[in-house]
Image: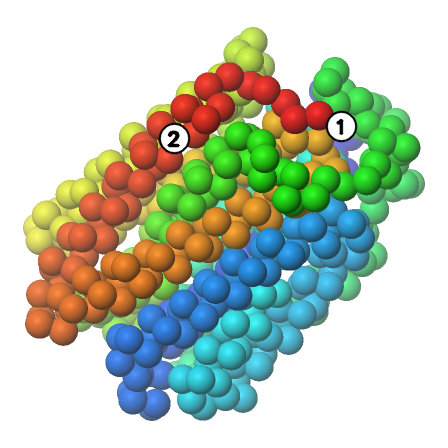
Amino acid sequence: MQATIGTYRWRICALVFFATTINYLDRAVISLLKSTLTAEMHWNDGDYANVEIAFKISYAIGLLIAGSIIDRIGTKKGYAWATGLWSVSAVSHAFVSTVGGFAGARAALGLTEAGNFPAAIKTVAEWFPKKERALATGIFNSGANIGAIVAPLSVPFIAVHFGWQWAFIITGVLGFVWLFFWLKYYHKPASQPLLSKAEFDYINSDKDELITVEKEAEPTISWIKLLQFKQTWAFAIGKLLTDPIWWFYLFWLPDFLESQYALKGTAIALPVALVYTISTFGSIGGGWLPMYLIKNNWPVFKARKTSMFIYALLVLPILLAQVAGGINMWLAVLIIGLAASAHQAWSANIFTTVSDMFPKSAVGSVTGIGGMFGAIGGIFLSLAVQKNLFVYYRSINKIETAYYIMFLVCGLAYLTAWIIMHILVPKMKKVV
């Protein structure tokens, strides 16, 4: 069947996958250099939290702007500008030497990296029918895991042998390599000469979403108007409550392994890589399950929400991560890996609810709004928990208590988000 239809859309998915890999690789570098930068620049946990918050604030602002811009100028130009600018920002970290300098570099990185997910989700909406979107989203979103795997395997090695500055330069330059392939190979389906008619018809096979060239040129919906819809708020609140959990893993997992088990430098690489390797299976499997249910005649929205409920339940074992870790470090690593895997499965589906409920002309904007709320959630988590309770308990040498608090937040976030989303949008209702 696939051979008859064609597979060009999966090449586009591969491009988005590599962009997301580079996006997360660039943002993960600093967490792996925390000990080095702390020793060299005399940082404390509060300084590191401030640098992290600078990224999150600018990321939130960037998402609000990026989604609207990408809807207006188009996916190809929008993705290209975002990737080029975030690559420059990533490299700029190598040329600063103060907390303020790093905060500025992180702010620039957050502002520009915000373009990735609105552009990626819009690309999937343009190139895939509904039944394949969660799978395509899961595949490209697994790039976040691959970036997080590559980072601990490469960044400490680069820092030890060439200096921490080169860790930022080398990872930042990768974005320019990707940019060449994106500009060369990406076009909308209607204007891609390498796309067969059979595959074009398959991409546009959804009965409620027959897209013509003329409809793709419709005016975009302003984000102020989009905020009037419950569907927007369901997505935004879901992101608000669950995005910060992934960011916590990304920014603090190396610290958890160091503070709890005295792992440092390259010794952190294997357990961190294992966590994100496990999460890769969740990302792809999370997209496969709703596709399987839809192919077995489940309504799209029911398949999506049922899958998300299952993934929310799979996060709950993280409540026992500290207990298990007291027995054996690898038990804690496996439990955190399961929770990270469930997050990625959840993420693949919550992103896809946007293209389920909104026209393609609004997908970038709604994704940006939701992403902004996710970043705001990350800021509040940093301020309310990490920078206060978390740092306080660490300061009095009660590190276990600090992580108990964080894992409790992680465990309950997804069920809470699912319940709120179900209350706001109990049944599928498309915004037209």
Whole-percent x, y for residue 427 in the image: 51, 17
Q: Residue at x 58, y 32 (%)?
A: 229
* Three-letter code, disc 1: Ile
Q: Residue at x 45, y 43 (%)?
A: 239
Q: Nearer the viewer, residue 247 or 54?
A: 54
Whole-percent x, y for residue 11 in the image: 72, 43
Whichever of labels 1 and 2 marks the residue nearer the N terminus, that label is 1
Disc 1 is placed on an element classified as helix
Whole-percent x, y for residue 29 in the image: 45, 70
Q: Residues within 10 Å of mark 2 (few under 14, many from 20)?
A: some
The quadrant in which the C terminus is found is: top right
* Three-letter code, disc 2: Ile
Question: Is the image coloured rainbow, by chain, by secondary structure, or in one colour?
Answer: rainbow
Label 1 belongs to which residue?
Answer: 203
233 relative position to 119: left or right: left
Indicate whether 62 appears above or below 190. below
Q: Residues within 10 Å of mark 1 (few under 14, many from 20)?
A: many
Q: Nearer the viewer, residue 13 or 385?
A: 385
Indicate whether 125 appears above or below 55. above
